[in-house]
Amino acid sequence: MKLSRQFTVFGSAIFCVVIFSLYLMLDRGHLDYPRSPRREGSYPQAQLSVLQEKIDHLERLLAENNEIISNIRDSVINLSESVEDGPKSSQGNFSQGAGSHLLSQSYLQVDPKDCLSVSQSGSLHPDVQMLDVYNLIPFDNPDGGVWRQGFDIKYDTHDWDDEPLQVFVVPHSHNDPGWLKTFNDYFRDSTQYIFNNMVIKLKEDSRRKFIWSEISYLSRWWDIIDTQKKEAVKRFLQKGQFEVVTGGWVMPDEATSHYFALIDQLIEGHQWLEKNLGVKPRSGWAIDPFGHSPTMAYLLKRAGFSHMLIQRVHYAVKKHFAWYKTLEFFWRQNWDLGSATDIFCHMMPFYSYDIPHTCGPDPKICCQFDFKRLPAGRFDCPWGLAPEAISSENVQRRAHLILDQYRKKSKLFRTKVLLAPLGDDFRYTDYGEWNLQFRNYEHLFQYMNSQPDLKVKIQFGTLSDYFDAVDKADAAMRNKGQSMFPILSGDFFTYADRDDHYWSGYFTSRPFYKRMDRIVESHLRAAEILYYFALRQAQKSMINTFLSSTHYMALTEARRNLGLFQHHDAITGTAKDWVVVDYGTRLFHSLSVLEKVIGDSAFLLILKNKSMYDTYSSDPFLEMNSIQKSQDSLPESHVIKLSAEEPRYLVIYNPLEQHQNSVVSIYVSSPTVKVLTDTGKLLDIQVNAVWNKETTISEEAYEISFVAHTPPLGLKVYTLLEAENSNSYLADYVLYNGEATSDIFNIMMSAQEPIILENPHMILSFDKTGLMETMITKEDKQLHNIKVQFTWYGTTNKRDKSGAYLFLPDGFAQPYVSTKVPIVRVLRGRIYSEVISYFEHVTHRVRLYNLQGIEGHSVEISNTVNIQDVFNREIAMRISSNINSQNRFYTDLNGYQIQPRRTLSKLPLQANVYPMTTMAYIQDAKHRLTLLSAQSSGVSSLKSGDIEVIMDRRLMQDDNRGLGQGVIDNKITANLFRLLLEKRSDADMEEERKSPVSYPSLLSHITSSFLNHPVFLMTIKVKLSSPATELLSEFLPLLSSLPCDIHLVNLRTIQAKVGSGHSNEAALILHRKGFGCQFSTRGMGLLCSTTQGKILVHKLFNKFTVEKLIPSSLSLMHTPPVAKNISVIHLSPMEISTFRIRLG
């Protein structure tokens, strides 16, 4: 108790110091806030302005003070508890290893009520749980007859006596925005003619219908057509002849895309539709993504959709669903305790979305009703039976033939409403096909509808026409107290279209661009947020140079380029080489323009006198710390030229919504350097060598590392000077299997010394090749066998081999054996330590940050992979542990939610590989081991205790899925990971085995955010006459950190209703992340707390007032009937919500 009182007194003393500091800060002659420019004759107004700034500054300081006091209070409580409980670990008196002195500050705690346990969450007994379905299906693939992957379908002609079969034939054309040709080439050669002919042919008969999905193409066509065509399209939409389905920028991949990009491309498409056509899509249409994610179902539901359609699902799952008539269901999220996430979903039953596989089970008959394949045409039917043009002589026979297929297909569903899509890739491009398809089907319709004994009503329809009819049938059943459709939870990965051909290869294909995609996402999000803040500042201060800039156009272009890359043949790595280059060039161009938007916005925000922005002419104002020189090269660090006379200014942007203490590393021209904060405080820095090669040190560049304290979503300015520095610490090096010399750094050559890295939380040991072998956690002094190794996969010797889509290995992976002993370099420093191994095909780096906080809890792993000289091989990293995970592991879906997996022995190896967007983990009753990733990859756990991630693939042949080439355009590719070992408590393994739900820990979520949204480092390029008086030391847009479990997905400036510019509003998108209960947050180093999903709007922003905040649907299509400003935001766990916001 005596010690407890001492801690309390100590906390009170700090409180007094803080209050006195506030007084001194207010009394300073200059404040780090912008002063209004003095106008002639308005001196009193200027005084008022300064006074107002002081008041604003005081408010901010008080808010920070409240947070400090809260930290102190929690620390006192924690210290008191630790005194009462006695010493539980050696962490409190840690003395080994460099850097233990860093960040000895107070941290916050998390409300236990905010976590989610398996027992309190999860869908309430859905009728169909996909994990159970996989247990039930034998995956034996017997021959099903004409429907080879199914079964023989029978029916009784009297089945429709009470109610006729209602058939909707839905004409469509699937247009890939890039695949065998680039987006522009496809548009030029095909797509524009589809639209042009649609305008003509739909006008000829009001009963004709057509649906379209990809807004990227529609907008491209819209830009070049005349008013007459535009008005015609609007008429077709109003009359229901033409329907836009889904309405995203593309039809995105659902395995490798991150939910940020999925939302963004959906908003871009819907915003374009709202502005140009005034329509709001109702139904989702996803016929070509290679497997389907419940994340997409959730996003569509949040956007206001009620129905959706999917196609590419494992053939054995389709057969199972068809047998039990569960091809139509309400798709519910695994974690949903109620029915709020339910969305009606139609699964197409057969092999493909083309005409031979959509009228019924027999493709050789359905193909005869694809009238583009008439004899003498360019296409024929591969089954040897050609279509016949419909005439009065054959209409009866042909009608009965196709009606038989319709009836058989309808027996797989629970209503007497049937969907019959009529289309394929790039169909209806020429005038003749429109005539052939529509006129022949019109003959068939006329005959069938005129024959009452056939008991069928058939017509052209849109997707929503079909769903409306299904809803009507469902409502009739509900009126009788029956529910017609089952509830389903789970996902539809990994997809197989036939035999053992699993599409798990594309989870990794072209990994260079998968990594680039994540970098562009991070840049776009940062640019969006900073731009909106800067825009509102510029409008208040009338900064015409900024307001008249092309920044919003640049943002729009970047949104569209990123959106285009989410296409299911782009981010998947399944396009032709030159098409991949086209995508990469677009992403690279977007990176460049986004860096300018970030730099210019940041510069405006840190200027004290905003009006001075117009006087600077540098382009850009701020220079990014790293430079990517081409679309297929890795970023390189820019060397900052230092001077003893002229300081350089480093501007750091924290894109996260919480305060962040992060290690920052930059290249400078001198090893003697000082880093100063705005108060003149000298920071501890670590000086590292820059290595040109494995054993050669640069004499022109040096890396310095220090810990930066950055505000949430804010900017912080640090000063760099060339000067002798007592707070500068040179890194030490040990080199194995190589030699190097330096006049500055201490380099030892060794062959025997054990390789060990250590920080306040763990000790890592490595083998002689620099691969990790063990981890000792200091909290409990426990030794964990955690081994890293690299492996090779080959491809099968069968006829069909691995390619861009398929993973068809030749068995289990073989250990990677380098042809020469790798050079291993060990760095030990005050801020971080690392081991780098130079293998023939991988440069492997393991880094430990010597911090008490978040970054010190995980191991950073970086692999730079180059397999340009191998033949039919895939390289993987395997992490082996003694965790008793058995056959269970967990992967994320789109960075949004976790899906439990089971490694099944009845499935081939490639079927047990799943997509990982941001993380995968294994666990037992005591521990969880998580691999966090900064790029999408294929991941598996083929053995208990293992996680294996495939990092790159080089395959010399096509896999017969239409691409017509292998994957041989490999780049030198950077893979970035974090490895996190966590202790679990109160874990009920039996309950977890039954549960379809799991959640990452809060530490895992935050570490993933660090990995995917690193700080942005910029140096000021403009010449400032007096930087101390011209620049703010920091920009703090938020009053305090957002709660730990709430992520600001985006703050996206909304388009103007008229013209090509922006409005004054933005879409504020928030996500409350669900996190697990079995993990302690004590000692984690949190700089935020949790609030049970509650945010007070008036306590959100610092320098801005919230003039408007109205809830909206996810993609801004819908607002509440009575749109009212809200003062409190409430988010449920896992919820993603969008708000229309206007800041003043």
Image (cartoon, helix red, strand yellow):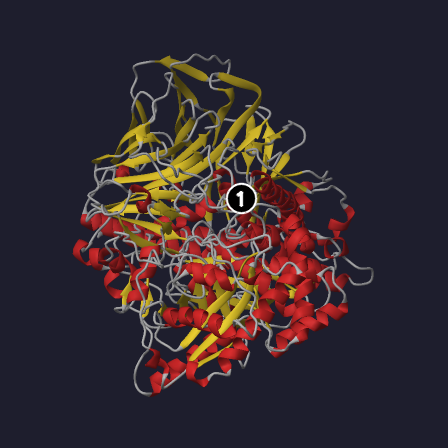
Instruction: Tell me which corner region of the image, top left, top right, bottom left or bottom right, holds residue 880.
Output: top left
Left or right: 920, with 354 as reference point = left
**Does residue 579 appear in the picture of this structure?**
yes
Comparing 993 with 528, the one in front is 993
Q: From the image, which quarter does the C terminus lie in?
A: bottom right
Comparing 47 with 548, the one in front is 548
Q: Position of residue 465 (x, y in %)?
A: 51, 76
Task: Report the residue at 72% width, 72% height from top.
Answer: 231
Number of callouts: 1
Comparing 610 with 848, the one in front is 848
Q: Decide: is 1063 above or below 754.
A: below
Left or right: 542, with 112 as reference point = right
**Does residue 460 appear in the picture of this structure?**
no
Disc 1 element = loop
Q: Position of residue 867 (x, y in %)?
A: 45, 28
Q: Decide: is 653 above or below 832.
A: below
Q: Residue at the right extreme?
A: 40
Q: Indicate the amino acid at tag 1.
A: Ala
Q: Residues within 10 Å of mark 1 (few under 14, many from 20)?
A: many
Q: Position of residue 1142 (x, y in %)?
A: 61, 67
Q: Decide: is 602 above or below 243.
A: above
Q: Decide: is 332 above or below 416.
A: above
Q: Position of residue 958 (x, y in %)?
A: 47, 38
Which residue bears the numbered disc 1?
575
Q: Residue at the left extreme?
A: 990
